[in-house]
Image (cartoon, helix red, strand yellow):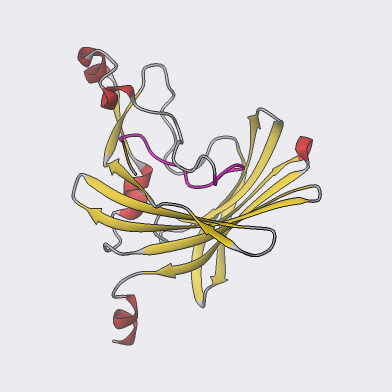
Amino acid sequence: MIMQSAAPFRFYGSTMASRWALSLGMVFCGLGTVDIAQCHAQEEVDNPVFRNWKDFPVGSTVSYRSTTKAGENSNIQEFTLRLKAKTAERITIERQLTAIMPDGTRQEYPAMTSENARVYRLPKGVERPDPNKPKGVIAEGEEELEMLGRKIKAKWFKAKMRVEAGDMFTHSWSSDQVPGGLVKAVNETPATKSVNTVEMIDLKIPGESQASDQ
């Protein structure tokens, strides 16, 4: 399946596995459902998905494990993001999702592909997002993490946001050393006693080992 949108995609969240592809909403200009004159009046905004992948070679792959716990119930899923193609104006990302059943069996779902343009048009009346931090930030800093045999310089943010179930508190780490930016994230919703943890479990960048040997 191929998804086309100029709007950025978000690959993590409290229900990350079920809504990985829909982030800030569709940009209706791209769908042809808004008057073209109105589209031209809208502001062009850099797409953070494009920005966070554009400097990596085609074939770069990053995998995550998402674990959601709510009381005695838990849900585990793994997903892999791969840069399939890129130009100066657009990148193509493939996402493969695998569900881990309670008995340990793995169920792999069909891969989905998203097309992400360099810029997207901000819908009228929507506040311009800060490209350097998420909404609702209450604390931030920098930290060096050791993961997968690497030292990763990361920025971290703690944020509070309102969701349907009540307040949700997030703690996320991002780095420009990782395709897409995300290193790990923890999302907690006290009202439902649920905690979602997303951790990077694999990272492959073509040509990296050759470069490190020189």
Count of marks, rendered view: 0
Q: Residue at x 35, y 53 (%)?
A: 94
Q: Is residue 169 left or right of residue 156?
A: right
Q: Position of residue 204 (x, y in %)?
A: 39, 70
Q: Quarter holding the N terminus?
A: top left
Q: Quarter holding the C terminus?
A: bottom left
Which secondary structure class fits the magenta region best?
loop
In front here: 104 or 174? 104
Residue 11 covered by magenta stretch: yes
Residue 14 covered by magenta stretch: yes
In front here: 140 or 212? 212
Q: Residue at x 58, y 51 (%)?
A: 172
The relative height of residue 173 versus residue 22 in the rendered view (above or below) is below
Q: Position of residue 143 (x, y in %)?
A: 57, 62
Q: Quadrant of residue 161?
A: top right
Q: Residue at x 23, y 45 (%)?
A: 90
Residue lying farthest to the left in this orientation: 88
Q: Which residues are magenta?
A: 4-17
The relative height of residue 19 versus residue 66 in the rendered view (above or below) is above
Q: Is residue 114 visible?
A: yes
Q: Residue at x 29, y 54 (%)?
A: 54
Q: Quadrant of residue 203?
A: bottom left
Residue lying farthest to the bottom in this orientation: 213
Q: Position of residue 68 (x, y in %)?
A: 67, 50
Q: Is residue 177 visible?
A: no
The relative height of residue 180 versus residue 191 in the rendered view (above or below) is below
Q: Quadrant of residue 144?
A: bottom right
In front here: 168 or 82? 82
Q: Is residue 74 left or right of residue 157?
A: right
The relative height of residue 12 versus residue 6 in the rendered view (above or below) is below
Q: Position of residue 167 (x, y in %)?
A: 70, 33
